[in-house]
Amino acid sequence: MDCFVAVAPRNGGWIAFLWGGLRRGSAVPTIFSLEAIGGHATLCQPYAAHEERSAMDAKTPKDLHYYEPANGHGLKHDPFNAIIAPRPIGWISSRDAKGNVNLAPYSFFNGFNYHPPIIGFSSTAWKDSVGNIQETGEFVWNLATMDLAQQMNATAAHVARDVSEFKISGLTAVPSRLVNVPRVGESPVSFECKLSQIIQLQGADGKKVQAWLTLGEVVAVHIDKAFIKDGVYQTAMARPIVRAGRRGDYFEIRPDAMFEMTRPD
Ligand SMILES: Cc1cc2nc3c(=O)[nH]c(=O)nc-3n(C[C@H](O)[C@H](O)[C@H](O)COP(=O)(O)O)c2cc1C
């Protein structure tokens, strides 16, 4: 922090001015004057000039890229999924009524409730996963990790409904306990789920769009004990991968990326 002092006579005593750039990370110094008259020191309000400057900063418009999605984004790549990022990956295994097994990643995915635990993913077309889950009412979510990144990606291949992505990617289909859908044996965490709702999404005008939100209740959980320390599941130890933007940007979650912040009471 830069600091300057000036001294001048005033009212038979002396006045000392102290300037300091007190605001971290800002090019604009926060200026205070310290008046020392007759042995008394008073920390005064920031200079009016500075207040004006701060107000100007707040009012200065950022150079915003503005667009209305209905008319296009005007960029090289749609920023939407780079902004809603990183997103966890719903690596979903399912089975159709004939018994064919399916595995596919969905990054429009999240958890929506604690009790009962409910998770969901959105399919931006009527894809096999949604069709299978509608037919059998069951699915499994598997955690996609750095070690399984290539295999996860391979399961996004568009293949015929009777082709198992477990086979394509060389992953092990391990039977679940409460649902008749296998989990990914190599994945450190899996949730067995029962379908609760399939909701076709609609726009603000009420018109249906070609996207389906599939929600399911988590009825059984498998966690590799290597990632549980003192009774606490260690999110970053499993090194989950999460989707960023464009067609192939990801982040790997590592322990050094974590910080703790407790909520206000
Ligand atoms: C990391 C990743 C995330 C994806 N997220 C979605 C998504 O959220 N919604 C979607 O419809 N497709 C998504 N896809 C594409 C599907 O995985 C792909 O269309 C797949 O073939 C669907 O498989 P299915 O027809 O067997 O369900 C994603 C692909 C990858 C690699």
Image (cartoon, rainbow, N blue to C red):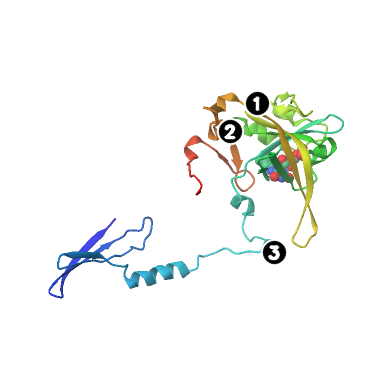
Left or right of 110? Residue 64 is: left
Left or right: 97, with 117 as reference point? right
| Most foreground residue, 161 or 265 | 265
Tag 2 residue: 146
Distance between the alpha carbons at the discs numbered 3 and 2:
37 Å
Image-quarter location of ligand 1: top right
Q: Amino acid at mark 1?
A: Glu
Q: Measuring 31% from the left and 70% from the top, which residue is drawn there?
A: 47
Indicate which disc, 3 or 2, sits on the residue closer to the N terminus.
Answer: 3
* Location of residue 125 with respect to 76 vertically, above or below: above
Counting from the top left corner in percent of width and height, residue 245 is at 61, 48
* In the displayed structure image, the side of residue 36 where residue 108 appears, left or right: right
x, y percent for residue 209: 78, 54
Question: Would you identify the image quadrant in which residue 57 lies?
Answer: bottom left
**Could you classify mark 3 by the number of other residues whose Cα lies within 10 Å: few (under 14), some (14-19), or many (20 or more)?**
few
Of badges 1 and 3, nearer the viewer stands 1
Amino acid type indicated by mark 3: Asn
The quadrant holding residue 78 is: bottom right
* Residue that protrudes farthest toward the front in the picture: 265
The residue indicated by pointer 1 is: 186
Helix, strand, or loop for circle 2? helix
Coordinates of residue 200 in the picture (x, y in percent):
79, 50
- Alpha-carbon span between mark 1 and mark 3: 44 Å
Callout 3: SS: helix
- The amino acid on which the numbered mark 2 sits, given as a three-letter code, is Met
Q: Can see residue 24?
A: yes
* Residue that badge 3 annotates: 71
